[in-house]
Image (spheres, rainbow, N blue to C red):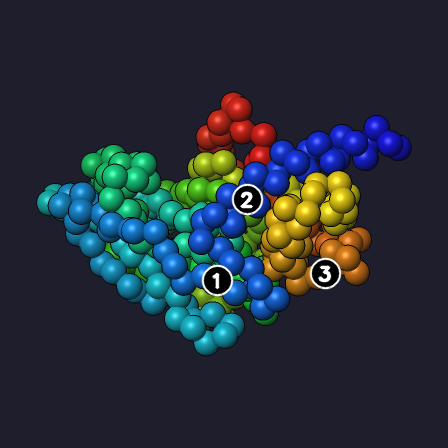
Amino acid sequence: MKLSYAISINRFFTNLFFIVFLSFSHLSFSQTFSQNSAQASRVKTTLLPEIATVSENIIYKTNKKGNPLQLDIYTPKGNVPSKLPVLIYVHGGGWVEGDKVILKDDYVENTMAKLIAKQYAVISINYTLLNDSTHFPQPLEDTKDAIRWVRKNAEKYNFDTHNIGIFGTSAGAHLSLMAAYTPDDTFIGSPELSSYPSSVNYVIDHYGPADLNKLFHTKTGTIPVFMVGLLSKKIISLQKNLVKGLSGYDIDKDQQKIIEYFKTVSPVNVVSGGVPTLIMQGNKDKIIL
């Protein structure tokens, strides 16, 4: 028992880096799980508009709080096929920050440029971000609704509905895997899109978490402050708030409910419905599981 707990503590320390990373990514968690408005300097892509026709800020749905969610479409210039294969990009940001903007000199920009050169339509989406009152499965519903929107608007934009893929990074990869592996009739958000399939032909996972219980060490519960030091007290608070943001539950009061819920939204538990999957993961990455 002591050995098992020691191993859990060791793994918890490893994954503290994940939470530290979020905290230094301009996230400030208060009791209201608020976000710090300070942002690092961001320069929007200049490459993609040179090689693609860009349609920006298209509203694909209105979320449960009445806020419009937008997407950007990048299609090849010049002579293009009558039907364009589609790749949907889902950004990262720990489920609590980030947006559809593609940044200059970012590897995502280069990846998209290569796909556009191969006559793909690439779509970058916004989704509902989590906070103290907004929890799962809203971001997942949005991700699947974006796929449904592509099918609904296939004729208008010349999309090939027989060749749709989804690609995500970090938290966006988690959403992409879940969207790809779960049935059409699950995680439906917008009634207007509910009649359209959310299936994809493949999914690309860039360092996405596949097991939320392992990532957040929910079976260990809250690690006592004395075991990690007072300086880590804020980090533990971040862990608790991220768990609550995802699940809607307090790990101090509803540990078992969180564990059971995280099982339902962890890709590792729904692989039976999977599609061809490309996983890109650093071989020294000890954080994402």
**Callout 2, which amino acid?**
Val
**Label 2 element class:** helix
Cα separation, mark 3 vs mark 1, equals 19 Å
| Identity, as a three-letter code, of the amino acid under mark 1 | Gln
Which residue is at 44% across, 42% downward?
169
Q: Which residue is mark 2?
A: 20
Q: Residue at x 49, y 29 (%)?
A: 281
Considering depth in this image, is 195 or 204 the residue closer to the camera?
204
| Comes first in the chain, label 1 or label 2 | 2
Q: Callout 1: helix, strand or loop?
A: loop
The residue that disc 1 covers is: 35
Q: Amino acid at mark 3?
A: Asp
Tell which circle, 2 or 3, labels the residue nearer the N-terminal end.
Answer: 2
Q: Earlier in the sequence, mark 3 or mark 1?
A: 1
Q: Which quadrant is the C terminus positioned in? A: top right
**3D distance between C-alphas at marks 2 and 3:** 20 Å
* Location of residue 3 with respect to 75 vertically, above or below: above
Looking at the image, which residue is at 52% across and 40% down? 208
Q: Which mark is residue 250?
A: 3
What residue do we see at 70% from left, 61% from top? 249
Q: Position of residue 43 (x, y in %)?
A: 24, 50
